[in-house]
C-alpha cells in the first residue's frame, strides 16, 4: 500500500507539470462494464462458430452482413455504458490544460461522454455510421434499434465507421497521434496490451521524460518511469485526490 501511495504521488507530480498525452485501450472501459477483447473474460475468449477476427473483417462485413450485424449488435454496442473514474479524470485534466490529448483504440465514445474534446479515435467509433450508397450518417441508436441489417432511407447498406480487420486507420488520425506523442513530456499508456498494430507502434515516437504504464496485466518496458497494475479508475482517482 505504501508503494502504491508513492507511485500515485509521483504520478500526481507528473500530471501537475502538464504536456501529458494519454494512450488507452479496451482496459480503460472495462470498469464501465464494456468487455475487452483479449483477457480471459474478453470477447475473443468466448467460443464462436467463426473467430471474431474474421467476423469483424472488411470482407466478412460485405459477404455475411447479417451474421456480422448479429455479432456487432450483441457485443460491440454498449450504449448503456457510462464513463468511469478514468474517463472523468482525463476530461478534468484536459480542462485544466494538463492533458493535451487522449488517443484511444476504443470505439465506445466514453471519453467524449465524460467531456474530453481532444480525442483521437484510432479505430473509429460506433456513434457514426454511413450509408455505403449515398453517404448519409446515422447514429448508434439507429443501428441498434434496426431489425436485422440496418439500411438507409435510400435503401443502401449502412456500415459502422469503425476500423474492421483489413481496413486502414482513419486518414490523418495516426499522423496526428504521432505528433502528440512525439511532443509530449509524459506519456501515459493505460488499459492496453500493446499488441494491436499499428497502434502499438505509437510508443516508439515518444521521446519525452516520463513513460507511465497502467494495465492489470503487467507490461514490461525497461524505459517505464512508473508501472501500475491496479485498476485504472482507482489510479486516476487517487492521482486527482
Image: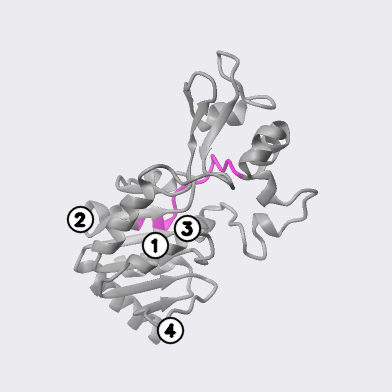
Q: Position of residue 101 (x, y in %)?
A: 30, 54
223 and 141: which is toward the camera: 223
What is the CA distance from the residue labelled 4 to the residue labelled 3? 36 Å
Density class for disc 3 (Cα within 10 Å; few <14, some 14-19, many ≥20) is few
What is the CA distance from the residue labelled 4 to the residue labelled 1? 32 Å
49 and 114: which is toward the camera: 49
Disc with the residue nearer the chain's start (4 vs 3)? 4
| Dominant SS in magenta | loop
| Disc 3 target residue | 198
For label 1, the SS is helix
Q: Position of residue 158 (x, y in %)?
A: 57, 26
Does the residue at mark 1 contact the one at mark 3 (Cβ under 8 Å)? yes
Q: Position of residue 224 (x, y in %)?
A: 37, 78
Q: Residue at coordinates 43% horizontally, 67% vertically from top-left?
A: 234
Which circle, 4 or 1, is nearer the viewer? 1
Q: Residue at coordinates 43% horizontally, 63% vertically from top-left?
A: 201
Q: Using the rendered view, name the quadrant where residue 79 is placed.
A: top right
Q: Which labelled disc corresponds to residue 202? A: 1
Q: Which labelled disc corresponds to residue 229? A: none
Q: Position of residue 34 (x, y in %)?
A: 56, 51
What is the CA distance from the residue labelled 2 to the residue labelled 3? 28 Å
In this picture, which residue range is highlighted in magenta? 76-89
| Residue at the top extreme, as displayed | 154
What is the CA distance from the residue labelled 1 to the residue labelled 3? 8 Å
Q: Residue at coordinates 30% horizontally, 47% vertically from top-left?
A: 118
Quadrant of the drawing holding the C terminus: bottom left
Disc with the residue nearer the chain's start (2 vs 3)? 2
Disc with the residue nearer the chain's start (4 vs 2)? 4
Disc with the residue nearer the chain's start (4 vs 1)? 4
Q: Is residue 234 magenta?
A: no
| Disc 2 target residue | 97
Disc with the residue nearer the chain's start (2 vs 1)? 2
Amino acid at each position: 500500500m505504501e508503494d502504491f501511495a508513492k507511485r500515485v504521488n509521483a504520478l500526481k507530480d507528473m500530471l501537475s507539470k502538464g504536456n501529458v498525452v494519454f494512450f488507452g485501450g479496451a482496459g480503460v472501459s472495462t470498469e464501465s462494464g464494456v468487455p475487452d477483447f483479449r483477457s480471459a473474460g474478453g470477447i475473443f475468449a468466448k467460443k464462436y462458430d467463426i473467430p471474431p477476427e474474421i467476423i469483424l473483417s472488411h470482407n466478412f462485413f460485405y459477404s455475411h452482413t447479417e451474421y456480422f450485424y448479429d455479432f456487432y449488435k450483441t457485443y460491440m454496442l454498449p450504449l448503456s455504458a457510462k464513463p468511469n473514474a478514468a474517463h472523468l479524470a482525463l476530461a478534468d485534466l484536459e480542462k485544466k490544460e494538463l492533458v493535451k490529448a487522449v488517443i484511444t483504440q476504443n470505439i465506445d465514445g466514453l471519453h467524449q461522454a465524460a467531456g474530453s474534446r481532444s480525442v483521437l479515435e484510432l479505430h473509429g467509433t460506433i456513434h457514426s455510421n454511413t450509408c455505403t450508397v449515398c453517404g448519409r450518417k446515422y447514429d448508434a441508436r439507429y443501428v441498434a434499434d434496426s431489425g436485422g441489417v440496418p439500411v438507409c432511407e435510400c435503401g443502401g447498406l449502412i456500415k459502422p465507421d469503425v476500423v474492421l480487420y483489413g481496413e486502414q486507420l482513419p486518414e490523418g488520425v495516426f499522423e496526428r497521434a504521432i505528433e502528440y506523442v512525439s511532443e509530449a513530456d509524459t506519456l501515459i499508456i493505460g488499459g492496453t496490451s500493446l499488441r494491436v498494430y499499428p497502434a502499438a507502434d505509437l510508443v516508439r515516437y515518444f521521446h519525452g521524460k516520463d513513460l507511465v504504464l497502467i494495465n492489470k496485466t503487467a507490461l514490461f518496458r525497461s524505459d517505464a518511469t512508473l508501472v501500475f497494475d491496479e485498476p485504472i479508475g482507482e489510479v486516476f482517482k487517487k492521482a486527482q485526490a
